[in-house]
Image: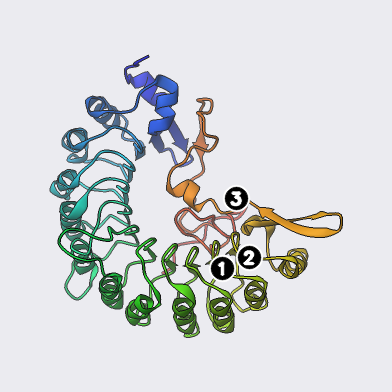
Amino acid sequence: MDRELTDILLQLFCEKNSDGTKNLRLKGRDLYQRIKRRINDEDMEQISKFLGDHPEIVKLDLCYNDIKDKGLAQLVLRYLRFENNLKYLNLIGCDLTGKSMRYFWKCAKTFKLTTLRVNGNKLGIEGAQHLSKLLEQNNTLKHLDLGDSDQTLSSIPYLCSVLREDIGANRTLQVLDISRIIPTSEYYQYDPGQLSEQLGNMLKVNKSLRELHAQKCQFDGHDIQLLLIGLRVNSTLMLLDLGYNKVGDHGIEEIAKWLRTRPNLIGLNVSGNAIGNTGARALSFHMPFSKIRLLDISHNKIGDDGIIDILNSLKKPYALKLFYIWGNDIKQKTFWILERMLLSKVLDQENIDVKLYTVDGVLYHAYYPSDHYKHKYYCVMDHGCPVELRIKRNKVEHEYAQPRALVKFQFYPRIPPVDETLSPKSKPC
């Protein structure tokens, strides 16, 4: 049954926040299961009007809908180009092309978004060009997600140049996702070394990025050496996501040597990188000198000896808070040490992805769903089916909430959680 998007129906999909603002959640799969269709271009005029009538809406989620360039043009021309309060826009998995990014660039003066997610769209080089022009003229955008958007070695230089403080103009972007670069084209052969060198040169002079996500870019150990040329100089990056590359033992050893110099990095994701016991042992030698509080080494080729070496290095001045190891070849020796660390509170069961259990006096392990990174990143429905529509109130965390956050990244849990009994700390001078 095709149901029209009326004001009453749209209000049902609004979530209230504790600070008086609202989030409009129109996820494609959720809508399809409820009203048997997704948002299309013809609906964008009504949505734009609804946003204009409700200035309290600060987040708009339109992921996995049938929105094309024409529909996005309606949103920009009828809403975004005027004064508005929208801070978050999610357009994952729509049918956008690089042409649609030009509309964002044209409304740069009224563009107040802090988060723009356009991953999963076919943006290509044209999209990167327009977004780089937007970054050059915009001072509000903090999170830009371009993963799986047909970026190539020809488009990444546009983004890197605008983020360089010596030749670029952007000083505000804090989170950049360029995962899944296209490996080949008819014009060139993909060279991950060239990409890592470009990123390294950008990081050398960039002072705003806090998170860099570069999954599935085919980086190997030698490419990591090129990337580290800039990382050794950078003083602001706090999360490095290199998941599902080809880092291997050589690459993780180079990263470990860099961690020994005590950079500001507190989060490292090297899952799915074919790291073995040799790389794990090298990491264990240098990690006690680092500030790492989040370590993801899941889905590698590490055995008991390598995991035990890392476990024996966890007691350090900066205690590890989030630790993910599922998918490695671990057995009884590792289980005994893990059980002891869980009992002694060195590790917290809620923050590791392995659950131990005993059968006939023998320890076994199972996956414990503590890592919700991919679940949140891809905006997956919590239960696979729409839940009851009701008034939902989200608690908005104060910027200086107490206790002080030791780990606080996009799609990772805040460690420790906010204590509502403590009043927020005053703004530092």
**Disc 3 marks which residue?**
420
Q: Position of residue 45 (x, y in %)?
A: 22, 27
Q: Secondary structure at mark 2?
A: loop
Quarter the C terminus occupies = bottom left
Q: Nearer the viewer, residue 234 or 78?
A: 234
Residue type at mark 1: give it.
Answer: Lys
Of mark 3 and mark 2, the one earlier in the sequence is 2
- Alpha carbon distance from label 1 to label 2: 6 Å
Q: Position of residue 263 (x, y in %)?
A: 45, 79
Q: Do tag 1 and tag 2 residues touch (Cβ < 8 Å)? A: yes
Task: Specify few, some or many for label 2: CA neighbours under 10 Å numbering under 14, 14-19, or 20 or more.
Answer: some
Q: Nearer the viewer, residue 277 or 386?
A: 277
**Disc 1 marks which residue?**
301
Q: Quadrant of residue 54?
A: top left
Which disc is residue 329 wearing? 2
Q: Nearer the viewer, residue 116 or 393?
A: 116
Quarter the N terminus occupies = top left
